[in-house]
Image (spheres, helix red, strand yellow):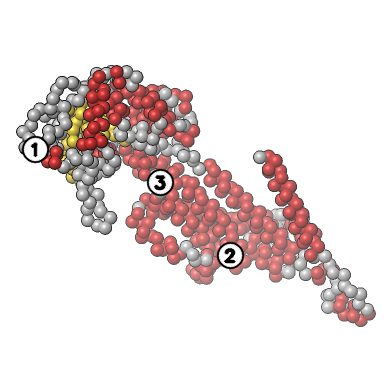
Amino acid sequence: MRSLKLKAAVISLLLFLLFIGAWHMATLPKESTSLAGASAEYAALMGKGAEKSGGFPPPLEVGRAFVKYLADPVYDHGPNDKGIAIQLGHSLARVGLGFFLAVLVAVPLGFVIGMSPLLLRAFDPFIQVLKPISPLAWMPLALYTLKDSNVSGIFVIFICSIWPMLINTAFGVASVRRDWINVARTLEVNPLRLAFLVILPAAAPTILTGMRISMGIAWLVIVAAEMLVGGTGIGYFVWNEWNNLALPNVIFAITMIGVVGMLLDMIFGRLQQLVTYRE
Amino acid sequence: MSTHFLLVEALQKVYPAAGGGTNAPVFEDIHFHIDRGEFVCIVGHSGCGKTTILNVLAGLEEATSGDAFMDGREVRGPSLDRGVVFQSHALMPWMSVLGNVAFAVKSKWPEWSKEKVREHCTGYLEMVGLGAAIDKKPAELSGGMKQRVGIARAFAIQPKMLLLDEPFGALDALTRGTIQDELLKIVQATHQTVFMITHDVDEAILLADKILLMSNGPHAKIAEIVEVTMPRDRTRAGIHHDPQYYRIRNHLVDFLVNRSKTYAGAEAGMFHDPRNPPLVRPGLDGERAPVLALPTGMAAPQLKQVINN
């Protein structure tokens, strides 16, 4: 088992080195064919022939961006120049708040819907229509009604997080084993104890799966939302660096988005393990 | 109202048909009673509604018509007075063994302290031989141990009556024997009133005072009530040395194999009063069925003895 892990790690490392190597080779500065006299001067004037015009940044340049931003992650030099930790912090705060509000609505509502076949049917058409709407499509409505770009971003996260949680909670609650409910009924367990001691633990793995999916979607959506609303956040950072044509910074930011997304997913994976029971 | 502890009168269950309308009743005209401290088994083929009857007594299901009374009160909805052991053990997998029993005990006595609940539960778990496994999760237990937890949970709330729905159906023969012995011991010690469904004829003879034989559904009825006339201090090891054992066993098997199909038909129409099903004692030798006035050309029913009380 350990040797399997080790082997996998070695192969991962090799793949990474191979990727960096290929990248490096592909972005080697092309030696400008020697141009004579006026031509060379003209080329220099046009900004050609110089090393930096190679187009896609080579790995070394991107590496420098990594070092630069990670060495000082929390500086704040005005609205367009903040450290990466601050930008990520803004994004995480938006995601956290939107997600938390979605939990507050989706889990109790899903519980009620899951308990009642009637409500499940009554809510179903709304859920089916609202679920496939891209969260960003809500943005104009949100901006118009909420009149605040930051709040609109949070609303977009809220609206995209709510559906997987709502559906999973309702499904989890509706499919709690009949036997367990019957045991509780023969014990004359009051509704509150039934909800918290039987149905909630029984449905918890399904609910957590819904939360994990929601969190994944929320992290995808926040980048796009921040590109639209601007101001702060990792999405805004990406857009800003694109406007600066600073591609190494963009690549750095993309990597950060991936790493944070992975960490979020790992956290929810752990939580899921905690509530999963073996039958 | 009579003085019987449990009284079931004219119970009938009709399930709605798939395309609207109704099916033929699964069972109808079910009358029986159980006295305090009695162990009653119900035997019959699948589909005769045994589980439905048990669920009605448990309050988990409603009969289409008819009534059940326990201890002078109508059975309406589930109650802590009736403990149920489910066929599929129905333990909550996220709770420990102790937690499962404690959940039941706290439901019955919410005012008890933690220590008192723990002590009470541990006592019942030790009674079923699980004193060492109280902190395990159900998933770590074998099928037989899980069913023991289910039994401990039902006994721990000290119900007036215990309802067992084929509790040993899913167990292998050896485990089943051991738990039957334990159940027998516990019931003999506590004089618990029990109503139990089983498919196992030997199990019924070992445990029961009376065995209700059901004819096949639809229109299932209680065909006969077999009284197990062997002394109450039976053991699984010694029971088959009793000459009564094979007579009772043959009677039951004969009913299940040959007579359960036709009982709702001619035989029933002629001689059967569902309000007062014949009480037979096949264990006692030399007692013949009383001679009924038979229409010519009709064979007498194979009854050893009929007592109409």
Where in the figure is residue A268, as x and y percent of width and height?
A: 56, 48
Residue drawn where x is 67% and y is 64% of the image: A238
Judge left or right: residue B52 versus residue A197: left
Q: Residues within 10 Å of mark 2 (few under 14, many from 20)?
A: many
Q: CA distance from mark 3 to mark 1?
A: 58 Å
Q: Amino acid at mark 2?
A: Ala
Find numbered disc 3 in the image and state the secondary structure of the residue it sits on.
Answer: loop
Judge left or right: residue B164 versus residue B214: right
The part of the image, by quadrant, that contains residue B143 is top left
The part of the image, by quadrant, that contains residue B214 is top left
Identify the chain of the residue marked 3, using the numbered disc in the image. A
Who comes first in sequence, dot 3 or dot 2? 3
Q: B102 or B93: nearer the eye?
A: B93
Q: Residue furthest bottom?
A: A38
Q: Above or below — where is B233 with respect to A279?
A: above
Find numbered disc 2 in the image and state the secondary structure of the residue it sits on.
Answer: helix
Q: CA distance from mark 2 to mark 1?
A: 91 Å
Q: Nearer the viewer, mark 3 or mark 1?
A: 1
Q: A85 or B150: nearer the eye?
A: B150
Which residue matches tag 3? A176
Assess whether mark 1 and mark 2 are in contact (beta carbons under 8 angstroms).
Answer: no
